[in-house]
Amino acid sequence: MIKKRICIIGAGPAGLINLATLTHDLNMSEWEVVLYERSSRFGGAWAWQDSEFMSTSTKYATQFASFVKFSTIDGFFRGQEWGEYLTDFVKEKGIGDFIHYNSEVTLCSRTENGWSVAVNGKEPGDFDYLILGSGLANRPKEQLDYMANLEELESKTEKLEGKTILIVGGGESAIDMAARYSKKNKIIFSLKSGIRLSPRVHPIRGVPSDYLRNEILLRVKETWRNYIGEKFVRGVKTFYTKIQKWTISGDKISLTTDENKRRELELELFNNAKDELYNVFHTKNDDFLKYPHNVEVWGPVVDHKGSSLTLKRISTDETIEIQPDYFVNGIGYVSTMDYLGDQIKVADFVYAVAHKSDPTVFLSGFARPVIGNIPTICELQARWICDIIMEKCTRPTEADWERDRAKQKLKYPTINIDAVYPTDMYPYCETLGRRLRPPESYRSPQMLLTPYSTLRYFPTPENISLVNKSPIFMPKIFFPLIWWMPKEKIHCVLPTHRK
Protein backbone atom coordinates (compact mmCIF):
# COMPACT_ATOMS: atom_id res chain seq x y z
CA MET A 1 0.00 0.00 0.00
CA ILE A 2 1.37 3.39 -1.01
CA LYS A 3 1.07 5.93 1.79
CA LYS A 4 -0.12 9.46 1.20
CA ARG A 5 2.54 11.99 2.21
CA ILE A 6 2.34 15.40 3.94
CA CYS A 7 5.25 17.85 4.09
CA ILE A 8 5.34 20.52 6.82
CA ILE A 9 7.91 23.32 6.52
CA GLY A 10 9.10 25.00 9.72
CA ALA A 11 9.31 23.72 13.31
CA GLY A 12 7.95 26.77 15.08
CA PRO A 13 4.65 26.60 17.00
CA ALA A 14 2.67 26.36 13.74
CA GLY A 15 4.67 23.44 12.40
CA LEU A 16 4.70 21.59 15.72
CA ILE A 17 0.95 21.85 16.39
CA ASN A 18 0.16 20.77 12.83
CA LEU A 19 2.51 17.83 13.19
CA ALA A 20 0.97 16.80 16.51
CA THR A 21 -2.59 17.15 15.20
CA LEU A 22 -1.97 15.19 12.00
CA THR A 23 -0.02 12.34 13.57
CA HIS A 24 -2.67 11.98 16.28
CA ASP A 25 -5.73 12.01 14.02
CA LEU A 26 -4.55 10.33 10.83
CA ASN A 27 -4.20 6.60 10.45
CA MET A 28 -0.41 6.45 10.27
CA SER A 29 -0.48 3.12 8.50
CA GLU A 30 -1.91 5.04 5.56
CA TRP A 31 -0.09 8.35 5.92
CA GLU A 32 3.46 9.66 6.22
CA VAL A 33 4.11 13.10 7.76
CA VAL A 34 7.49 14.84 7.51
CA LEU A 35 8.52 18.16 9.03
CA TYR A 36 11.60 19.99 7.69
CA GLU A 37 13.36 22.56 9.89
CA ARG A 38 16.31 24.46 8.48
CA SER A 39 17.94 25.13 11.88
CA SER A 40 19.23 22.67 14.45
CA ARG A 41 16.33 23.00 16.89
CA PHE A 42 12.59 23.57 17.00
CA GLY A 43 10.86 26.53 18.61
CA GLY A 44 10.62 29.38 16.12
CA ALA A 45 11.33 33.07 16.64
CA TRP A 46 11.16 33.48 20.43
CA ALA A 47 11.50 30.05 22.05
CA TRP A 48 15.15 30.39 23.08
CA GLN A 49 15.74 33.80 24.63
CA ASP A 50 18.01 35.14 27.36
CA SER A 51 16.95 35.60 30.96
CA GLU A 52 15.70 39.17 30.40
CA PHE A 53 13.05 38.14 27.87
CA MET A 54 9.35 38.32 28.81
CA SER A 55 6.50 37.29 26.51
CA THR A 56 3.77 39.73 25.55
CA SER A 57 0.98 37.19 26.12
CA THR A 58 0.43 35.20 29.30
CA LYS A 59 1.14 31.51 29.70
CA TYR A 60 -2.57 30.85 30.23
CA ALA A 61 -3.58 32.49 26.95
CA THR A 62 -0.65 31.23 24.84
CA GLN A 63 -0.50 27.52 25.71
CA PHE A 64 -1.98 24.92 23.37
CA ALA A 65 -5.41 23.64 24.39
CA SER A 66 -4.15 20.11 23.74
CA PHE A 67 -1.28 20.55 26.20
CA VAL A 68 -2.41 22.59 29.19
CA LYS A 69 0.10 23.29 31.94
CA PHE A 70 -0.79 26.80 33.18
CA SER A 71 -3.59 28.74 34.87
CA THR A 72 -4.15 32.47 35.37
CA ILE A 73 -1.74 32.54 38.32
CA ASP A 74 1.28 31.73 36.16
CA GLY A 75 1.88 35.10 34.48
CA PHE A 76 4.19 35.49 31.47
CA PHE A 77 6.84 33.32 29.84
CA ARG A 78 10.35 34.43 30.79
CA GLY A 79 13.73 33.51 29.38
CA GLN A 80 13.53 30.11 27.71
CA GLU A 81 10.30 28.98 29.36
CA TRP A 82 8.41 28.96 26.05
CA GLY A 83 11.11 26.76 24.54
CA GLU A 84 10.92 24.46 27.55
CA TYR A 85 7.14 24.26 27.19
CA LEU A 86 7.52 23.28 23.52
CA THR A 87 10.16 20.71 24.50
CA ASP A 88 7.69 19.08 26.87
CA PHE A 89 5.01 19.30 24.18
CA VAL A 90 7.17 17.50 21.59
CA LYS A 91 8.05 14.79 24.11
CA GLU A 92 4.48 14.32 25.35
CA LYS A 93 3.06 14.11 21.81
CA GLY A 94 5.84 11.79 20.64
CA ILE A 95 6.55 13.79 17.48
CA GLY A 96 10.32 14.23 17.75
CA ASP A 97 11.11 11.49 15.24
CA PHE A 98 9.06 13.21 12.54
CA ILE A 99 11.25 16.37 12.62
CA HIS A 100 14.22 16.61 10.25
CA TYR A 101 16.69 19.28 11.44
CA ASN A 102 19.26 21.18 9.38
CA SER A 103 16.95 20.54 6.44
CA GLU A 104 16.39 23.66 4.38
CA VAL A 105 13.74 23.38 1.69
CA THR A 106 15.43 24.75 -1.41
CA LEU A 107 12.75 24.11 -4.01
CA CYS A 108 9.04 23.34 -4.13
CA SER A 109 7.19 22.79 -7.38
CA ARG A 110 3.62 21.84 -8.11
CA THR A 111 3.10 18.44 -9.72
CA GLU A 112 0.01 16.86 -11.21
CA ASN A 113 -0.97 15.25 -7.90
CA GLY A 114 0.80 17.31 -5.28
CA TRP A 115 4.25 18.79 -4.64
CA SER A 116 7.86 17.99 -5.38
CA VAL A 117 10.04 19.12 -2.46
CA ALA A 118 13.84 19.34 -2.53
CA VAL A 119 15.83 19.64 0.72
CA ASN A 120 19.41 20.96 0.92
CA GLY A 121 19.58 20.84 -2.88
CA LYS A 122 19.20 17.07 -3.01
CA GLU A 123 16.89 14.95 -5.12
CA PRO A 124 13.28 16.05 -4.48
CA GLY A 125 10.60 13.87 -2.92
CA ASP A 126 6.91 13.77 -3.82
CA PHE A 127 4.15 14.82 -1.40
CA ASP A 128 0.38 14.92 -1.64
CA TYR A 129 0.00 17.93 0.65
CA LEU A 130 2.16 20.90 1.65
CA ILE A 131 1.76 22.89 4.89
CA LEU A 132 3.79 26.10 5.09
CA GLY A 133 4.67 27.07 8.65
CA SER A 134 7.83 29.11 8.10
CA GLY A 135 6.29 32.11 9.84
CA LEU A 136 6.03 35.87 9.64
CA ALA A 137 9.51 36.61 11.03
CA ASN A 138 11.28 34.75 8.27
CA ARG A 139 13.83 37.40 7.28
CA PRO A 140 14.54 40.99 8.42
CA LYS A 141 13.62 43.72 5.98
CA GLU A 142 16.45 45.29 4.01
CA GLN A 143 18.58 47.88 5.76
CA LEU A 144 18.18 51.53 4.92
CA ASP A 145 21.08 53.26 3.19
CA TYR A 146 22.10 55.37 6.20
CA MET A 147 22.67 52.24 8.30
CA ALA A 148 25.81 51.30 6.38
CA ASN A 149 28.02 53.53 8.57
CA LEU A 150 26.46 52.49 11.86
CA GLU A 151 27.07 49.48 14.07
CA GLU A 152 24.00 47.31 14.45
CA LEU A 153 23.11 46.14 17.92
CA GLU A 154 22.43 42.46 17.38
CA SER A 155 23.39 40.70 20.60
CA LYS A 156 20.47 40.59 23.02
CA THR A 157 22.79 39.65 25.86
CA GLU A 158 25.26 42.49 25.40
CA LYS A 159 25.56 44.77 28.44
CA LEU A 160 25.65 48.46 27.53
CA GLU A 161 25.73 51.61 29.62
CA GLY A 162 25.87 55.28 28.69
CA LYS A 163 25.39 54.67 24.96
CA THR A 164 23.07 56.30 22.44
CA ILE A 165 20.95 53.71 20.62
CA LEU A 166 18.89 54.59 17.57
CA ILE A 167 15.88 52.30 17.13
CA VAL A 168 14.30 52.51 13.70
CA GLY A 169 10.72 51.23 13.72
CA GLY A 170 8.21 50.45 16.45
CA GLY A 171 7.36 46.77 16.11
CA GLU A 172 7.62 44.20 18.87
CA SER A 173 11.32 43.50 18.34
CA ALA A 174 12.13 47.21 18.40
CA ILE A 175 10.15 47.80 21.59
CA ASP A 176 11.72 44.78 23.28
CA MET A 177 15.19 46.19 22.57
CA ALA A 178 14.13 49.60 23.90
CA ALA A 179 12.88 47.99 27.10
CA ARG A 180 16.10 46.02 27.43
CA TYR A 181 18.47 48.98 27.16
CA SER A 182 16.48 52.04 28.29
CA LYS A 183 17.51 51.83 31.96
CA LYS A 184 21.17 52.72 31.39
CA ASN A 185 21.28 54.12 27.84
CA LYS A 186 19.80 56.86 25.69
CA ILE A 187 17.08 55.50 23.41
CA ILE A 188 16.06 57.47 20.31
CA PHE A 189 13.14 56.18 18.25
CA SER A 190 12.90 56.97 14.55
CA LEU A 191 9.27 56.37 13.56
CA LYS A 192 7.04 57.10 10.59
CA SER A 193 4.03 57.27 12.90
CA GLY A 194 3.11 56.68 16.52
CA ILE A 195 2.76 53.30 18.24
CA ARG A 196 -0.30 51.65 19.73
CA LEU A 197 0.94 50.44 23.10
CA SER A 198 -1.16 47.82 24.87
CA PRO A 199 0.70 47.18 28.14
CA ARG A 200 1.15 43.70 29.53
CA VAL A 201 -0.25 44.87 32.87
CA HIS A 202 -3.54 46.76 32.79
CA PRO A 203 -3.01 50.30 34.16
CA ILE A 204 -6.15 50.24 36.32
CA ARG A 205 -6.73 46.64 37.35
CA GLY A 206 -3.05 45.84 37.86
CA VAL A 207 -3.36 42.36 36.27
CA PRO A 208 -2.21 41.06 32.87
CA SER A 209 -4.27 42.74 30.15
CA ASP A 210 -4.98 39.29 28.68
CA TYR A 211 -7.22 38.55 31.64
CA LEU A 212 -9.58 41.48 31.04
CA ARG A 213 -10.33 40.39 27.50
CA ASN A 214 -13.30 38.11 28.01
CA GLU A 215 -15.94 36.94 25.60
CA ILE A 216 -18.78 39.16 26.71
CA LEU A 217 -16.70 42.29 26.06
CA LEU A 218 -15.35 40.93 22.79
CA ARG A 219 -18.90 40.25 21.61
CA VAL A 220 -19.88 43.92 21.94
CA LYS A 221 -20.48 45.43 18.50
CA GLU A 222 -17.07 46.23 17.08
CA THR A 223 -17.76 49.87 16.23
CA TRP A 224 -19.04 50.49 19.76
CA ARG A 225 -16.12 48.65 21.30
CA ASN A 226 -13.62 50.61 19.24
CA TYR A 227 -15.21 53.96 20.12
CA ILE A 228 -15.42 53.23 23.84
CA GLY A 229 -11.96 51.68 23.86
CA GLU A 230 -10.43 54.66 22.08
CA LYS A 231 -11.96 57.13 24.55
CA PHE A 232 -11.02 54.99 27.54
CA VAL A 233 -7.38 54.56 26.48
CA ARG A 234 -7.05 58.26 25.76
CA GLY A 235 -8.54 59.08 29.17
CA VAL A 236 -6.22 56.65 30.94
CA LYS A 237 -3.17 58.11 29.23
CA THR A 238 -4.27 61.71 29.79
CA PHE A 239 -4.96 61.23 33.50
CA TYR A 240 -2.46 58.43 34.05
CA THR A 241 -0.80 59.90 37.12
CA LYS A 242 -3.99 60.39 39.10
CA ILE A 243 -5.45 57.03 38.12
CA GLN A 244 -2.24 55.26 39.04
CA LYS A 245 -2.06 56.88 42.48
CA TRP A 246 -5.72 56.19 43.24
CA THR A 247 -6.08 52.63 42.02
CA ILE A 248 -2.81 50.70 41.85
CA SER A 249 -0.74 49.50 44.73
CA GLY A 250 3.00 49.76 44.34
CA ASP A 251 3.53 45.99 44.36
CA LYS A 252 1.44 45.55 41.20
CA ILE A 253 3.05 48.01 38.83
CA SER A 254 6.34 49.87 38.84
CA LEU A 255 6.04 53.65 39.14
CA THR A 256 7.98 55.71 36.65
CA THR A 257 10.85 57.97 37.60
CA ASP A 258 9.03 60.91 36.06
CA GLU A 259 5.29 60.38 35.58
CA ASN A 260 4.74 63.62 33.67
CA LYS A 261 7.43 62.77 31.14
CA ARG A 262 6.02 59.28 30.74
CA ARG A 263 2.56 60.69 30.10
CA GLU A 264 3.96 63.04 27.45
CA LEU A 265 5.66 60.15 25.65
CA GLU A 266 2.54 57.99 25.81
CA LEU A 267 0.36 60.72 24.36
CA GLU A 268 2.88 61.52 21.64
CA LEU A 269 2.96 57.88 20.54
CA PHE A 270 -0.81 57.51 20.88
CA ASN A 271 -1.80 60.72 19.07
CA ASN A 272 0.49 60.04 16.10
CA ALA A 273 -0.55 56.41 15.64
CA LYS A 274 -2.29 55.78 12.34
CA ASP A 275 -5.70 54.19 11.85
CA GLU A 276 -8.26 53.33 14.51
CA LEU A 277 -7.41 51.76 17.83
CA TYR A 278 -8.25 48.16 16.90
CA ASN A 279 -7.32 48.35 13.22
CA VAL A 280 -3.57 48.50 13.63
CA PHE A 281 -1.09 46.20 15.36
CA HIS A 282 -0.49 46.79 19.06
CA THR A 283 2.77 46.38 20.94
CA LYS A 284 2.22 44.81 24.35
CA ASN A 285 5.33 46.10 26.07
CA ASP A 286 5.67 49.54 27.64
CA ASP A 287 8.58 48.75 29.97
CA PHE A 288 10.78 51.33 28.22
CA LEU A 289 8.49 54.03 29.64
CA LYS A 290 9.78 53.28 33.13
CA TYR A 291 12.78 55.43 32.24
CA PRO A 292 11.19 58.28 30.25
CA HIS A 293 14.14 60.66 30.62
CA ASN A 294 16.22 58.16 28.64
CA VAL A 295 13.73 58.00 25.74
CA GLU A 296 13.06 60.38 22.85
CA VAL A 297 10.58 59.95 20.00
CA TRP A 298 11.42 61.36 16.58
CA GLY A 299 10.26 60.86 13.03
CA PRO A 300 12.19 59.54 10.00
CA VAL A 301 15.80 60.26 9.08
CA VAL A 302 15.85 63.17 6.60
CA ASP A 303 19.61 63.48 6.07
CA HIS A 304 22.80 61.61 6.88
CA LYS A 305 26.53 62.17 6.59
CA GLY A 306 28.61 59.23 7.68
CA SER A 307 27.44 58.26 11.14
CA SER A 308 25.75 61.63 11.73
CA LEU A 309 21.97 61.56 11.19
CA THR A 310 19.31 64.26 11.05
CA LEU A 311 15.82 63.35 12.21
CA LYS A 312 12.61 65.39 12.20
CA ARG A 313 9.56 65.19 14.42
CA ILE A 314 6.67 63.02 13.30
CA SER A 315 4.19 65.87 12.99
CA THR A 316 6.34 69.04 12.93
CA ASP A 317 9.38 70.40 11.09
CA GLU A 318 11.63 70.37 14.18
CA THR A 319 14.88 68.49 13.56
CA ILE A 320 17.74 67.04 15.59
CA GLU A 321 21.23 65.83 14.65
CA ILE A 322 22.55 62.73 16.41
CA GLN A 323 25.53 60.40 16.27
CA PRO A 324 24.32 57.09 17.71
CA ASP A 325 26.71 54.48 19.03
CA TYR A 326 24.44 51.65 17.86
CA PHE A 327 21.28 51.20 15.87
CA VAL A 328 18.51 48.61 15.94
CA ASN A 329 16.81 47.62 12.70
CA GLY A 330 13.26 47.35 13.96
CA ILE A 331 11.37 48.07 10.75
CA GLY A 332 10.03 44.53 10.77
CA TYR A 333 10.33 41.30 8.87
CA VAL A 334 9.23 39.94 5.54
CA SER A 335 7.88 36.45 5.09
CA THR A 336 9.80 34.87 2.26
CA MET A 337 9.08 31.58 0.57
CA ASP A 338 11.77 31.79 -2.10
CA TYR A 339 11.66 28.04 -2.64
CA LEU A 340 8.14 28.45 -4.06
CA GLY A 341 9.02 31.11 -6.62
CA ASP A 342 5.86 32.96 -7.66
CA GLN A 343 3.57 29.95 -7.25
CA ILE A 344 2.13 30.86 -3.83
CA LYS A 345 1.23 34.19 -2.21
CA VAL A 346 -0.13 34.82 1.28
CA ALA A 347 -2.93 36.85 -0.29
CA ASP A 348 -4.23 33.75 -2.13
CA PHE A 349 -5.36 31.96 1.03
CA VAL A 350 -8.77 32.14 2.67
CA TYR A 351 -8.32 33.26 6.29
CA ALA A 352 -4.57 32.74 5.72
CA VAL A 353 -5.06 28.95 5.85
CA ALA A 354 -6.68 27.29 2.82
CA HIS A 355 -5.71 28.22 -0.74
CA LYS A 356 -8.55 29.70 -2.77
CA SER A 357 -8.23 27.09 -5.52
CA ASP A 358 -5.43 24.61 -4.77
CA PRO A 359 -6.60 21.86 -2.34
CA THR A 360 -3.06 20.56 -1.71
CA VAL A 361 -1.40 23.52 0.04
CA PHE A 362 -2.07 25.30 3.35
CA LEU A 363 -0.64 28.10 5.48
CA SER A 364 -0.35 28.04 9.26
CA GLY A 365 0.96 30.82 11.47
CA PHE A 366 0.52 33.61 8.93
CA ALA A 367 -2.53 35.26 10.52
CA ARG A 368 -1.24 38.04 12.75
CA PRO A 369 -3.64 39.25 15.46
CA VAL A 370 -3.91 42.98 16.17
CA ILE A 371 -4.12 41.98 19.82
CA GLY A 372 -3.63 38.34 20.76
CA ASN A 373 -1.12 35.59 20.07
CA ILE A 374 -0.19 33.41 17.12
CA PRO A 375 0.48 29.96 18.72
CA THR A 376 -3.07 29.30 19.89
CA ILE A 377 -4.50 30.58 16.60
CA CYS A 378 -2.27 27.99 14.93
CA GLU A 379 -3.97 25.22 16.90
CA LEU A 380 -7.36 26.07 15.42
CA GLN A 381 -5.77 26.36 12.00
CA ALA A 382 -4.18 22.93 12.44
CA ARG A 383 -7.55 21.46 13.46
CA TRP A 384 -9.16 22.92 10.32
CA ILE A 385 -6.33 21.77 8.03
CA CYS A 386 -6.48 18.25 9.41
CA ASP A 387 -10.26 18.06 9.04
CA ILE A 388 -10.07 19.30 5.45
CA ILE A 389 -7.46 16.66 4.61
CA MET A 390 -9.58 14.01 6.32
CA GLU A 391 -12.64 15.35 4.44
CA LYS A 392 -14.51 15.98 7.69
CA CYS A 393 -15.45 19.47 6.56
CA THR A 394 -15.72 21.31 3.26
CA ARG A 395 -13.04 23.50 1.77
CA PRO A 396 -13.71 27.24 1.41
CA THR A 397 -14.60 28.48 -2.06
CA GLU A 398 -13.27 31.30 -4.22
CA ALA A 399 -16.39 33.24 -3.24
CA ASP A 400 -15.26 32.91 0.42
CA TRP A 401 -11.87 34.24 -0.61
CA GLU A 402 -13.36 37.24 -2.41
CA ARG A 403 -15.53 38.14 0.58
CA ASP A 404 -12.60 37.74 2.94
CA ARG A 405 -10.34 39.97 0.82
CA ALA A 406 -13.02 42.67 0.60
CA LYS A 407 -13.46 42.69 4.38
CA GLN A 408 -9.70 42.84 4.94
CA LYS A 409 -9.27 45.81 2.60
CA LEU A 410 -12.11 47.67 4.28
CA LYS A 411 -11.02 46.99 7.85
CA TYR A 412 -7.24 47.39 7.48
CA PRO A 413 -6.72 50.13 4.87
CA THR A 414 -3.24 51.08 6.09
CA ILE A 415 -1.81 47.54 6.26
CA ASN A 416 -0.37 45.69 3.28
CA ILE A 417 -2.73 42.69 3.30
CA ASP A 418 -0.83 41.14 0.39
CA ALA A 419 2.11 40.52 2.72
CA VAL A 420 0.39 39.78 6.03
CA TYR A 421 -3.07 38.73 7.18
CA PRO A 422 -4.10 41.05 10.04
CA THR A 423 -6.98 39.96 12.21
CA ASP A 424 -8.78 40.43 15.49
CA MET A 425 -8.13 37.21 17.37
CA TYR A 426 -11.63 36.60 18.75
CA PRO A 427 -13.72 36.92 15.55
CA TYR A 428 -10.99 35.07 13.65
CA CYS A 429 -11.15 32.10 16.02
CA GLU A 430 -14.94 32.25 15.89
CA THR A 431 -14.80 32.12 12.09
CA LEU A 432 -12.72 28.96 12.16
CA GLY A 433 -14.79 27.58 15.01
CA ARG A 434 -18.03 27.94 13.04
CA ARG A 435 -16.54 25.82 10.27
CA LEU A 436 -15.64 23.10 12.77
CA ARG A 437 -18.42 23.26 15.32
CA PRO A 438 -21.40 20.88 15.20
CA PRO A 439 -24.97 22.09 15.88
CA GLU A 440 -24.87 20.79 19.45
CA SER A 441 -21.88 21.21 21.71
CA TYR A 442 -20.85 22.34 25.16
CA ARG A 443 -22.31 25.63 26.46
CA SER A 444 -21.29 27.62 29.52
CA PRO A 445 -22.32 31.17 30.55
CA GLN A 446 -19.25 31.22 32.81
CA MET A 447 -17.12 31.32 29.66
CA LEU A 448 -18.47 34.78 28.90
CA LEU A 449 -16.79 36.25 31.98
CA THR A 450 -13.51 34.38 32.40
CA PRO A 451 -10.37 35.41 30.43
CA TYR A 452 -10.69 34.58 26.76
CA SER A 453 -8.50 31.79 25.45
CA THR A 454 -8.78 29.06 22.85
CA LEU A 455 -9.05 26.44 25.61
CA ARG A 456 -12.82 26.63 25.26
CA TYR A 457 -12.66 25.38 21.68
CA PHE A 458 -11.27 22.04 22.86
CA PRO A 459 -13.58 20.87 25.65
CA THR A 460 -11.72 18.14 27.44
CA PRO A 461 -12.94 17.77 31.03
CA GLU A 462 -9.69 19.38 32.21
CA ASN A 463 -10.09 22.40 29.91
CA ILE A 464 -13.75 22.91 30.82
CA SER A 465 -12.87 22.81 34.51
CA LEU A 466 -9.95 25.24 34.12
CA VAL A 467 -12.00 27.75 32.11
CA ASN A 468 -14.99 27.63 34.44
CA LYS A 469 -12.84 27.94 37.56
CA SER A 470 -10.73 30.83 36.28
CA PRO A 471 -11.18 34.11 38.18
CA ILE A 472 -13.28 36.90 36.69
CA PHE A 473 -11.17 40.02 36.27
CA MET A 474 -13.67 42.13 34.35
CA PRO A 475 -14.79 45.23 36.29
CA LYS A 476 -18.18 44.68 37.92
CA ILE A 477 -19.63 47.66 36.07
CA PHE A 478 -19.80 45.49 32.95
CA PHE A 479 -21.57 42.56 34.62
CA PRO A 480 -25.06 43.69 33.44
CA LEU A 481 -23.96 42.79 29.92
CA ILE A 482 -24.54 39.14 30.84
CA TRP A 483 -28.30 39.81 30.74
CA TRP A 484 -27.94 41.37 27.27
CA MET A 485 -26.38 38.23 25.82
CA PRO A 486 -29.10 36.14 24.10
CA LYS A 487 -29.01 32.46 25.02
CA GLU A 488 -28.37 31.39 21.44
CA LYS A 489 -25.21 33.53 21.37
CA ILE A 490 -23.60 31.88 24.36
CA HIS A 491 -20.37 30.47 23.07
CA CYS A 492 -20.22 26.88 21.86
CA VAL A 493 -17.00 24.92 21.81
CA LEU A 494 -15.84 22.04 19.66
CA PRO A 495 -16.59 18.43 20.49
CA THR A 496 -13.96 15.86 21.30
CA HIS A 497 -13.93 13.95 17.99
CA ARG A 498 -10.57 12.25 18.20
CA LYS A 499 -9.60 8.71 17.39
Image (cartoon, rainbow, N blue to C red):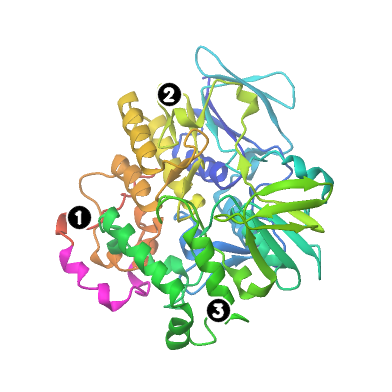
Q: Residues within 10 Å of mark 2 (few under 14, many from 20)?
A: some
* Residue 24 seen in this snapshot: yes
**Disc 1 on helix, strand or loop?**
helix
Residue 478 is a magenta residue: yes
Foreground pick, 90 / 437: 437
The residue beneath circle 3 is 260
Please give left or right for residue 231 compared with residue 284 in the image.
left
* In the image, residue 23 lies in the stretch drawn in magenta: no
The kind of residue on which mark 3 rests is: Asn
Image height of 124 relative to 182, above or below? above
Q: Position of residue 185 (x, y in %)?
A: 76, 69
Question: Upstream in the sequence, badge 3 or badge 2?
Answer: 3
Residue 393 position by quadrant? top left
Q: Earlier in the sequence, mark 2 or mark 1?
A: 2
Residue underneath mark 1:
489
Q: Which residue is mark 2?
A: 359
Q: CA distance from mark 2 to mark 1?
A: 32 Å
**Is residue 87 among the parts visible in the rendering?**
no
